[in-house]
Amino acid sequence: MKNPYEVLRTKEQELIRVRKEMDALRIAARLLGAEDPGAANGEAPSKLPRVVEMP
């Protein structure tokens, strides 16, 4: 049987990794959006779906 504390620690580490990946993707999306002429006016790119941030 797995140690519940070890499983919890592993899941917490995975969560931290996924949050870092999400931050990197947000940065990349902003950089790619800067190439869109509408992004210069503060408009969201219409061809991309809206990003929903989780708490």
Image (tube, rainbow, N blue to C red):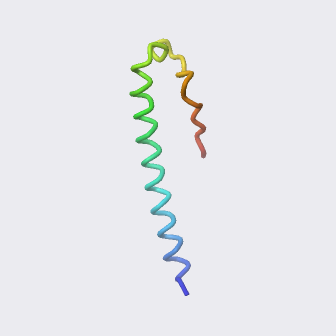
Side (left or right) of 24 relative to 6: left
Q: Quadrant of residue 54?
A: top right
Q: Residue at x 44, y 24 (%)?
A: 33
Which is nearer the eye, 47 or 55? 47
Q: Residue at x 44, y 40 (%)?
A: 25
Which is nearer the eye, 32 or 47? 47
Side (left or right) of 44 relative to 21: right
Q: Quadrant of residue 23?
A: top left
| Residue 36 screen position, x and y as percent | 44, 18
**How many numbered marks appear?**
0
Q: Quadrant of the N terminus?
A: bottom right
| Residue 13 screen position, x and y as percent | 45, 63
Side (left or right) of 44 relative to 27: right
Instruction: Using the image, determine if residue 49 lies above or below residue 54.
Output: above
Q: Residue at x 58, y 40 (%)?
A: 53
Residue at the outermost front position: 47
Q: Residue at x 53, y 83 (%)?
A: 2
| Residue 48 screen position, x and y as percent | 54, 28
